[in-house]
Amino acid sequence: MAISEKLRLFLDQSRADYKASTHPLAYTAREVASAEHLPAGEVAKTVVVWGDNGFAMLVLPANMVIDFQELRTALDLTHVRLATENELGELFPDCDLGAMPPFGALYKMPVFIDSSLLRDESIAFNAGTHRDVIRMKMEDYKRLASPTVISVARETMAQHGW
């Protein structure tokens, strides 16, 4: 499977300046960072959650996890959970499971980006497969995705040595 055709059309029709690359099979965002020779904090992972208002995309650095208490507070939610694999398969039929690109408009859902990703001038993310990555300037990504900025990511305990 190559870059999602839906994603390619969207980027090309939007006249986005991006670079696509292919790397060996990588299932986690940290593995993608390693395969692309990028710091994990510069690679974005897309996490889909279901809450009071339906599904939403969260975009956060590969080396961080969602703080669900912060997420509930930031989005004023009573309940929130990760989307199941079955739900992801239904929501993203054109993508490998877990390799969805961070453009909610393509899948009719809102996008929230963690503020920690805004420190970098560029962003890299899965392009619908576990082998393909898109890199683009952060300003271009923000223009195309129109994400809402929130602060819900935190470092994992393993990074602290606990």
Image: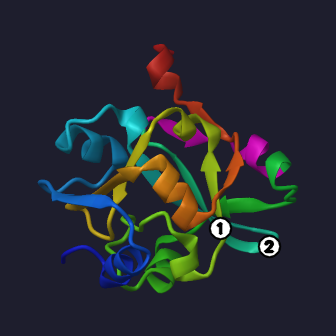
Q: Residue at x 19, y 61 (%)?
A: 131
**Extent of the magenta region:** 63-72
Q: Nearer the viewer, residue 79 or 133?
A: 133
Q: Give the labeled residue for mark 2.
A: 53
Is 150 displayed left or right of 102 in the figure? right
Question: In the displayed structure, would residue 67 be above or below residue 127?
Answer: above
Q: Residue at x 63, y 39 (%)?
A: 115
Residue 151 at what x, y percent from top left?
70, 39
Given contact means CB atoms under 8 Å apart, are the residues at marks 2 and 1 in contact? Answer: yes
Image height check: is 109 above or below 99? below
Amino acid carrying mark 1 in the image: Ala
Mark 1 neighbour density, 10 Å: few (under 14) some (14–19) many (20 or more):
many
Question: In the structure shown, which secondary structural element does the residue marked by tag 1 occupy?
Answer: strand
- The residue closer to the viewer here, 116 or 29, is 116
User: What x and y, as percent, mark residue 154?
Assistant: 60, 32
**Badge 2 density bin: few <14, some 14–19, many ≥20, Cα 10 Å:** few
Circle 2: residue type: Asn
**Is 7 displayed left or right of 132 in the figure?**
right
Work out which residue is located at the far front of the displayed protein and give it. Answer: 15
Mark 1 = which residue? Answer: 56
Task: Name the side, left or right, on which 27 lies relative to 123.
Answer: left
Report helix, strand or loop for mark 2. loop
> What distance separates the C-alpha of mark 2 from that of mark 1?
8 Å
User: Does residue 148 appear in the picture of this structure?
Assistant: yes
